[in-house]
């Protein structure tokens, strides 16, 4: 197992090089000039010496291959470069923006699993009956309603009309955030004993997490239903039933554990995707996360930010996949890595 | 010559300002008290927090509250200047030497007094950093300290716009002692030696404005609190939060619930829907934002479009009234590229919509059968105007005189890359004012010495070039006459046509008093605002 994990971790190096190279090449083909973002149209046009100076300072006077090598060299020293859009080190930006995204992703996936799995089980157990149809309808709605629309409707109903949801953002506008330890407001407020912020942060997470998680919830519930149905019809379940085990024990202990394996894969991948930012949800809920940061970076042709965040996302996918693979072994005793 | 506020020729432009309730309206208002938190929502565009390196809209609003400038543009009359850190100012007869007399009671938020040394350091640094806002100091030969409370600016040539330029947000005066201790430099090598940007970006403000910055969370909010050492009267609210709300529907919902007090980015349609809701007020104000059509001056780029008669024909083919409707009527048509509200802009008439005249001009130019041309434009909503609809109107208008526009919507970056390449035969672009003076719309637009758009369009008008310096050496009534002549000369070959000047629109809770909507977004002043 250790050797397997080590091998997978070593994969990070060639993958990182590949991902940054592709990101570099793509950003270079866009017909726009980062100097414009830096200097504005007026100075960029009227002041050639400023243009030359800034090209040099930001390294744009070098050919692409040299710039790529310089980037890798800095990266090896833990320096992700400076963002053109925020004028700060990309590493600092990631440290500021990523926790908001991570917190939202964790709660969204938690919602999706806590609702999606039972829904799938109910549907499978009551296969073909009313409960199945209702569960399938909920699942289908969750996975087919566009997230930006769901977000707007949810805010209109729960915030504007019923007035049960708090305003958008991570905390009430007049509250000061808890002292930064992890950057996750729920965790930091717990660690510092700031109960006002804790309750407030949880309340603020509820709506965006449900909106972002709705899609995943639908997916999870449909997968659980399908694979549970298949498992319930398999030989070992028949054996278990013939041994006289209770239906409850058959479904929850024998069948469900096996049926969850494909679900774990999907949840892992979706979680990795959500951890890299959800632009639409973050925009509608004014959530200062990585998705909006990356969207702004892309529009400002912010090389360092785009390449570094792409790299980070690749790392997240590798890490999550690794966790998922290890999870297989725990769920299915037949799977062993050597 | 004394150029105080009384000496300047004033154009009555009171209609330019829509004062929120409680502003000189004469009506009785509900009792408003000092204190509380004002929340202003706007989609963020922020780069640096260093005022001398930044020129983005949202940062400008913040910097305008935190840093003071030598002079302020009057909120009611855009052609008038009010005292800022300078209580009075003089200029010599040919507008090349300007002396500013500083107030003696101004202090930075850390308690240090504002002196002439700070002014010199700040203005020198602004120019020598060669950053995005540095252009404002173009032509200033030297900044000299006469005594601790007197500063003299000398320009290389006459510059009648210099006083207005000193109201530009980024001519922010910073505390030079602290800045230098944090690595700031102002000499000719500042662009490479200055190391203070990181200090500013770590939420340190060194200003003498009514507020100081207490918190900045990127893509989230600026939190401003009172500057205890501000020279002016105490601000009406304790705290101002400038909140990043990227989605206009969300902004509307927050306003309806009362979680924000001012919605800074709503569109005309939303404003009309909100107008009838209780507790919400809508304010419109004329802006100086300009969308203008441009054509090339180079026959190599396009033979027909570089023809002066075709420029004239197009100016008469456009149905300006239907363009104004894109803003639900909340817009103006500028006569040339100088927006209405600025000195001398209204001294000439705008081009008349006359399709027959346009057809005659096309025939005269030898293009009676018309021609086809690609039309690249930014597929965006700019100043609340949908550029797709604007392009479609132009396409329909020009089709009537045989010009077939082949519409090519692209991203804004792509559009600017094409425009800057000098190979764009025709298109429309945008201009937001840097300072409230007609020179911001004549120098960069028409003059071959400044050579900004003249370079890009490869078009030069020697008559305009010859007269242009006079617009900077004259003052008062004489200057207005120069702008009249300049515009008349320009209209003979209208290679750029002012299409629309859309109004600002804001929605705010009725508990907000004393907030003035002005023609320049970044000139919002939150210090007199009170909440009831």
Image (tube, rainbow, N blue to C red):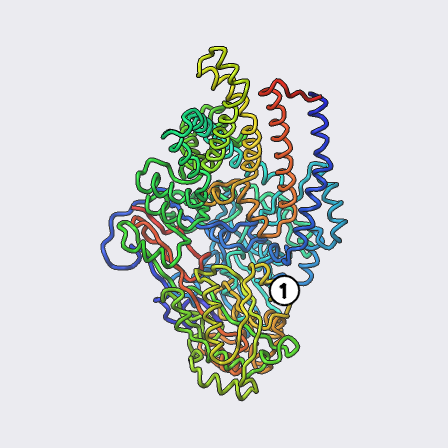
Q: Secondary structure at mark 1?
A: helix
Is residue B285 in sight in this rendering?
A: yes
- A24 or A112: nearer the eye? A112
- Residue at the left extreme? B28
Residue in view at x 53 percent, y 87 percent: B363
- B354 or A95: nearer the eye? B354
- A245 or B10: nearer the eye? A245
Chain of residue at mark 1: A
Residue B2 percent location from the top left of the image = 47, 70
Instruction: Find disc 1 in the rendering and name its residue.
Output: A45
Q: Quadrant of the N terminus of chain A?
A: top right
Horizontal arrangement in the rendering, residue B66 relative to residue B259 (left or right): right
- Residue at the bottom extreme? B364
Q: Quadrant of the C terminus of chain A?
A: top right
Residue A65 percent location from the top left of the image = 76, 49
As displayed, is residue B195 above or below residue B24? above
Horizontal arrangement in the rendering, residue B525 relative to residue B364 (left or right): left
Horizontal arrangement in the rendering, residue B335 relative to residue B529 (left or right): right
Residue in view at x 64 percent, y 58 percent: A31
Q: Quadrant of residue B144?
A: bottom right
Residue in view at x 70 percent, y 38 percent: A16
Horizontal arrangement in the rendering, residue A30 relative to residue B99 (left or right): right
Is residue B105 in sight in this rendering?
A: no
Residue A288 percent location from the top left of the image = 50, 41
As displayed, is residue B304 above or below residue A175? below
As displayed, is residue A289 above or below residue B156? above
Within 10 Å of disc 1 (Cα), the crowding (few <14, some 14-19, many 20+) is some
Tally of numbered discs: 1
Q: Quadrant of residue A75?
A: top right
Q: Quadrant of residue A258?
A: top right
């Amino acid at each position: 197992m250790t050797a397997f994990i080590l091998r997978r971790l070593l994969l990070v190096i060639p993958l990182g090089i590949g991902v940054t190279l592709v990101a570099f090449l793509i950003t270079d083909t866009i017909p726009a000039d980062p100097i414009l973002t830096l200097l504005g149209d007026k100075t960029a046009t009227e002041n050639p010496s400023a243009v030359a100076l800034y090209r040099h300072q930001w390294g744009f006077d070098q050919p692409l291959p040299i710039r790529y090598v310089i980037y890798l060299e800095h990266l090896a020293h833990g320096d992700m470069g400076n963002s053109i859009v925020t004028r700060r080190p990309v590493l600092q930006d990631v440290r500021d923006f990523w926790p908001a995204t991570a917190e939202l992703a964790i709660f969204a996936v938690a919602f999706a699993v806590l609702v999606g799995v039972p829904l799938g089980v109910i549907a499978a157990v009551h296969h073909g009956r009313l409960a199945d149809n209702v569960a399938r309808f909920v699942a289908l709605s969750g996975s087919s309603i566009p997230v930006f629309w769901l977000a707007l409707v949810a805010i209109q109903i729960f915030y504007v009309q019923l007035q049960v949801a708090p305003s958008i953002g991570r905390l009430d506008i007049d509250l000061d955030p808890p002292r930064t330890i992890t950057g996750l407001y729920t965790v930091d407020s717990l660690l510092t004993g700031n109960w006002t912020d804790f309750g407030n942060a949880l309340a603020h997470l509820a709506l965006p997490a449900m909106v972002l998680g709705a899609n995943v919830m639908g997916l999870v519930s449909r997968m659980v239903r399908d694979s549970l149905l298949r498992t319930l019809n398999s030989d070992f379940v028949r054996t278990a039933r013939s041994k006289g085990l209770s239906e409850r024990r058959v479904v929850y202990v024998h069948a469900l554990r096996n049926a969850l394996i494909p679900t774990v894969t999907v949840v892992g991948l979706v979680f990795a995707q959500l951890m890299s930012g959800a632009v639409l949800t973050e925009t509608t809920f004014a959530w200062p996360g990585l998705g909006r940061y990356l969207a702004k970076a892309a529009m400002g042709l912010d090389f360092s930010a785009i390449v570094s965040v792409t790299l980070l996302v690749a790392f997240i996918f590798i890490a999550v996949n690794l966790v998922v693979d290890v999870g297989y072994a725990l769920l299915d005793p037949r799977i062993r890595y050597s | 010559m004394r150029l105080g506020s009384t000496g300047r020729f004033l154009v009555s432009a009171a209609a330019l300002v829509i004062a929120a309730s409680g502003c000189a309206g004469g009506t009785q208002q509900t009792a408003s008290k000092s204190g509380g938190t004002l929340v202003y929502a706007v989609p963020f565009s922020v780069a640096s927090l260093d005022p001398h390196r930044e020129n983005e809209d949202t940062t400008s609003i913040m910097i305008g509250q935190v840093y003071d400038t030598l002079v302020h543009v009057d909120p009611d009359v855009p052609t008038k200047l009010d005292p800022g850190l300078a209580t009075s100012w003089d200029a010599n007869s040919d507008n090349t030497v300007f002396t500013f007399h500083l107030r003696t009671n101004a202090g930075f938020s850390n308690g240090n007094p504002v002196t002439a040394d700070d002014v010199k350091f700040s203005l020198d640094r602004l120019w020598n950093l060669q950053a995005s806002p540095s252009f404002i100091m173009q032509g200033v030969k030297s900044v000299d300290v006469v005594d601790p409370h007197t500063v003299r600016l000398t320009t290389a040539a006459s510059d009648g716009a210099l006083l207005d330029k000193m109201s530009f947000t980024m001519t922010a005066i910073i505390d030079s002692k602290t800045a230098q201790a944090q690595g700031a430099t102002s000499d000719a090598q500042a662009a490479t030696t200055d190391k203070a940007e990181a200090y500013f970006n770590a939420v340190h403000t060194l200003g003498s404005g009514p507020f100081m910055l207490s918190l900045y969370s990127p893509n989230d909010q600026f939190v401003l609190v009172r500057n205890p050492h501000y020279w002016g009267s105490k601000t009406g609210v304790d705290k101002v939060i400038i909140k990043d709300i990227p989605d206009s529907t969300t902004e509307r919902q927050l306003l309806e619930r009362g979680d924000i007090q001012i919605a800074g980015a709503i569109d005309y349609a939303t404003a009309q829907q909100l107008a009838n809701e209780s507790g919400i007020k809508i304010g419109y104000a004329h802006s100086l934002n300009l969308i203008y059509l441009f054509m090339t001056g180079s026959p190599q780029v396009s033979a027909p479009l570089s023809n002066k008669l075709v420029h004239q024909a197009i100016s008469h083919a456009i149905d300006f009234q239907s363009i104004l409707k894109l803003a639900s009527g909340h817009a103006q048509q500028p006569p040339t590229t100088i927006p209405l509200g600025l000195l001398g802009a209204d001294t000439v008439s705008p081009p008349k919509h006359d399709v027959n005249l346009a057809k005659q001009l096309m025939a005269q130019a030898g293009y009676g059968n018309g021609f086809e041309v690609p039309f690249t434009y930014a597929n965006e909503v700019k100043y609340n105007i949908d550029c797709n609809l604007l392009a479609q109107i132009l396409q329909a208008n020009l089709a009537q005189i045989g010009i077939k526009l082949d519409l090519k919507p692209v991203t804004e970056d792509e559009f600017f890359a094409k425009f800057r390449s000098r190979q764009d035969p025709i298109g429309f672009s945008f201009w937001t004012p840097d300072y409230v003076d007609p020179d911001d719309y004549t120098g960069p637009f028409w003059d071959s010495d400044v050579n900004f758009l003249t370079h890009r369009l490869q078009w030069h008008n020697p008559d305009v070039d010859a007269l242009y310096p006079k617009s900077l050496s004259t003052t008062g009534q004489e200057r207005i006459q120069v702008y009249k002549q300049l515009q008349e000369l320009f209209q003979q070959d209208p290679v750029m046509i002012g299409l629309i000047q859309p109004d600002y629109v804001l929605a705010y809770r009725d508990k907000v008093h004393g907030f003035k909507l002005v023609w320049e977004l970044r000139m919002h002043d939150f210090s007199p605002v009170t909440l009831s």
